[in-house]
Image (tube, helix red, strand yellow):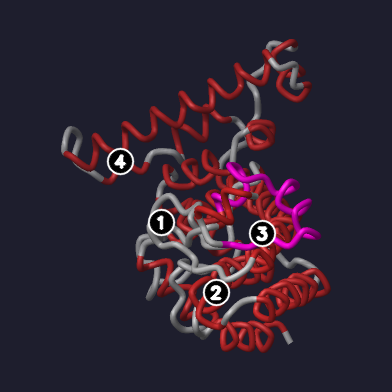
Amino acid sequence: MKVLQEKHGIHIQEDKQQALLNMGYFHGFKGYRFIKESDNRIQYSNFDEVIAIYQFDKKVKTIFYPYIMQIETALKNITLDTIIGLASADFAYVFENLLNDYNKHTPGDKDFKKKMKNRLELRNIIYNTISYNYRMNQSIIQHFIHKNKPVPLWAIFEVISLGDFGFFIHCLNKEARVNIAKSLSIYSESHDQKVRVLEDMIFLIKDFRNAVAHDGVVFDCRFQLTPPPNRCIQFLQSETAIDNITFEVIIDYVILHIYLMNKIDSPQKDIQRLIRTFTVASERLRKKLPASIYSSIMGKDVSNKMMSLKRLVT
């Protein structure tokens, strides 16, 4: 408390001191004193503003977690169903017949080597994941190992991470990617000629999911490891008719989640609840912060985006 007052010039009323203790200084306040970069400091005038951002950050994670899991499960199941329809649930068969995007390139050239390297890396990741889950007594994996049977793709999807699932999609040949995109009604020849938007979206959600699951800071999207490709942004803007999607602000992740929830046929009540609870949380934040700080966090067009989202689902 003394550090905040002397070093940061933030006065803490006596009745708010417990809030700082609950938040913590090194693992709490320090994470909320800047936007994205440590040199982009938030000019707080009082500790209530710190609490407001901290509480908003916590609320966002609480709101999103169940919907992230819902999307992850649905995307894996839809992908699995499509792949079984094209080939088999046998991973070895899928590896030979669908995870072969390198085939369209000349053996030995740069693209061939890159895609072959990815393919072999994916196989190693999957085998290592099976091995790890066997050691951890994961019953789904042990069942097949103990019966001396290959672990089927559906069981593999149960244990691989969201990021590894995205990498799996990345390694599929174009025909398989097209069929999965069509199953989700997100196939677009004009905006996604290489059929890569689905994996782009999965990697965006993966970064967000990991931050939420590990209680990282999310209010300013600092969790984003790599900027999304323009094709993903242009696709989403075309599909939603919402402009200026950048994924630099958290509202853009709301847009992505709502879009995917529509595609996986989530109940409309869930979609409306997500919009409603996020709106309440962001409005509470707006009332407790100066307009300049609020717009730096949420973006200057957050209200327009929220209105567009509501029209999208009504």
What residue is drawn where x is 63% and y is 31%?
156
Residue bearing mark 1? 37
For discs 1 and 4, the disc positioned in front in the rendered view: 1
In the image, is 207 to the left or to the right of 263?
left
Residue bearing mark 3? 54
Amino acid type assigned to the residue bearing label 3 in the image: Tyr
Quarter-of-image position of residue 286: bottom right
In the image, residue 224 sits, relative to residue 189, either above or below, namely above
In the image, residue 132 sits, relative to residue 73, either above or below, namely above
Which is nearer the N-term, disc 3 or disc 2?
3
Segment tinted magenta in the rendering: 10-31
Helix, strand or loop for disc 1: loop
Helix, strand or loop for disc 3: helix
Which is nearer the N-term, disc 1 or disc 4?
1
Amino acid type assigned to the residue bearing label 4 in the image: Asn
Q: Nearer the viewer, residue 60 or 143?
A: 60
What residue is drawn where x is 38% and y is 75%?
190
Disc 1/disc 3 C-alpha distance (Å): 17 Å
Amino acid type assigned to the residue bearing label 2 in the image: Met
Residue 235 % position (x, y)? 44, 73
What residue is drawn where x is 69% and y is 31%?
155
Residue bearing mark 4? 103
Which is nearer the N-term, disc 3 or disc 4?
3
